[in-house]
Amino acid sequence: MTEKNHAVWNVRFLNQIMDSMAEGVFTLDTQGRITSWNRSMEQITGFESSEALGRSCEILGFSRCLGRVCPADVRECGILEHESPEAKECVLRHRDGRDIPVIKQARVVKDEKGQVIGIVETVTDMTELHRARHKAEEASRLLSEHYRFTNILGKSQAMQEVFSRVRAAADSRSTVLIQGESGTGKELIARAIHYNSEQAEQPFVTVNCSALTETLLESELFGHVKGAFTGAVKDRRGRFEEAHGGSIFLDEIGELSPSIQVKLLRVLQEREVERVGESRSRKIDIRVIGATHRDLESLLAQGMFRQDLYYRLKVFPIHLPPLRERREDIPLLVSHFIAQQSRESKKRITGIEPQAMRFILDYEWPGNVRELENAVEHAFVLASEDMIRVSDLPAEILSASRHPGRTRVDLVQEFPAGKELKTQPSREQLIELLHACSWNKAEVARQLGVSRTAVWKYMKRFNIPLNPPR
């Protein structure tokens, strides 16, 4: 091969390499004229190679070069003096006028004598990354909105006290212990504390302490080093380290083994962790939020939970009341779950019949809010009309009764809609019916078969306010 042919082959090979690159690459001579333009540049900018060659990079309209607006002349932009400036995130103007987010970097090319012979610039399209960033930011915004106090439902006095304590916890970095029966929303409260605190942008890490064996839980919480145990093929950070700067939520903390309790106590006292198989301590800055449905004081008495750990966790306790102790919140929750199911399904359910609501209000709800949500979803599956009816409710709700000797059917048929009222309702029955009818006195009167005036008289006699309590 002749020297000339060899040179031509080298040029072709170099062009093929440039065209195979995902990054946009173009070169300029010392006068700032474009001398090469790879295929990725065509895709990113919309300019064909034939349109770009011989022109200046002014056609790209970069928003910044070396910290300032891109000048028209390469001799003014400063690249010849800086030679290899840092990569900059900016935008370029697409052929069709769109702005394309990119990362660009320029480098001066010199010959063996140190003379400048040109400039090579690389351009990385950041469009997909920007979309991902936007989605992540939007998800973060929606997440923080989802866990605002106004989105945790409850108008009862018991829940108002919970909200007050959640606000206080959010304004501090103290360790929090949330206690309540299963299904009362302990994780929801933990997230509300985190996402309403100054650390809302930092990690929120959750760990279910009852879901893993002691060995796996230790590795999950504290991490491990390579070779610490069979299967530890590389170093791994634990959940405490992942939560650095933010919060860690330890659910079912009453299930911790004695050895894990000792290690957790050290985390709370020293704010440092040791990975499994390593003696080095690592400092962490976290807020610990624990939760349990168990009676920790009873576990203390049985010797199953450390007293020193208990008091370290119970710096700021929050007790979530069971649903049966705040029945006045049930109609509000039912309406919320109906609206939620309507959005998620194709069915258009507008509400619940008063008789069905009376069954719901009378049930003990051992599974609390989670069970209520599942019951509404169950009713949606069976509902064939625009209202949830008694027959749509789960069997356990229909079969249970707080009134010995009286069946649920008795309660439903006690005041059949549109029939003449034979007996005066009790104060409890009237309040339940008012809740079921969203405090609509005309609907209550229709259900009782009396006039609205009679309903007002009953309310006055029982000292029931005309408007729903706030």
Image (cartoon, rainbow, N blue to C red):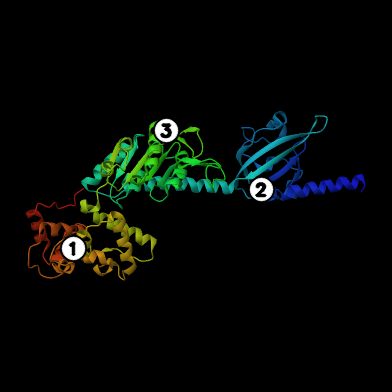
Q: Nearer the N terminus, badge 3 or badge 1?
A: 3
Whether the residues at callouts 3 and 1 have beta carbons within 8 Å, the answer is no
Residue 45 numbered tag:
2
Q: Real-space Cα distance between discs 3 and 1? A: 51 Å
Q: Secondary structure at mark 3?
A: loop
The furthest residue to the right? 2
Position of 328 with respect to 273 (left or right) is left
Q: Measured from the top left, where is residue 383 in percent x and y?
A: 31, 69
Q: Secondary structure at mark 2?
A: helix
Q: Measured from the top left, where is residue 335 in percent x and y?
A: 28, 57
Position of 345 with respect to 86 (left or right) is left
Amino acid bearing label 2: Thr
Q: Real-space Cα distance between discs 2 and 1? A: 72 Å
Q: Nearer the viewer, residue 204 or 195?
A: 204
Q: Nearer the viewer, mark 2 or mark 1?
A: 1
Name the residue that disc number 1 marks.
401
Above-or-below relation of 32 to 182: above
Q: Is residue 437 visible?
A: no
- Classify residue 205 by image quadrant: top left
Amino acid bearing label 1: Ser
Amino acid bearing label 3: Arg
Q: Residue at x 13, y 70 (%)?
A: 419
Q: Is residue 374 visible?
A: yes
- Classify residue 347 by image quadrant: bottom left
- Classify residue 424 by image quadrant: bottom left
Q: Secondary structure at mark 1?
A: loop
Name the residue that disc number 3 marks.
271
Q: Real-space Cα distance between discs 2 and 3? A: 51 Å
Instruction: Please tell me how crowded label 1 is: few (under 14), some (14-19), or many (20+) other residues with Cα within 10 Å.
Output: some
Q: Nearer the N terminus, badge 2 or badge 1?
A: 2
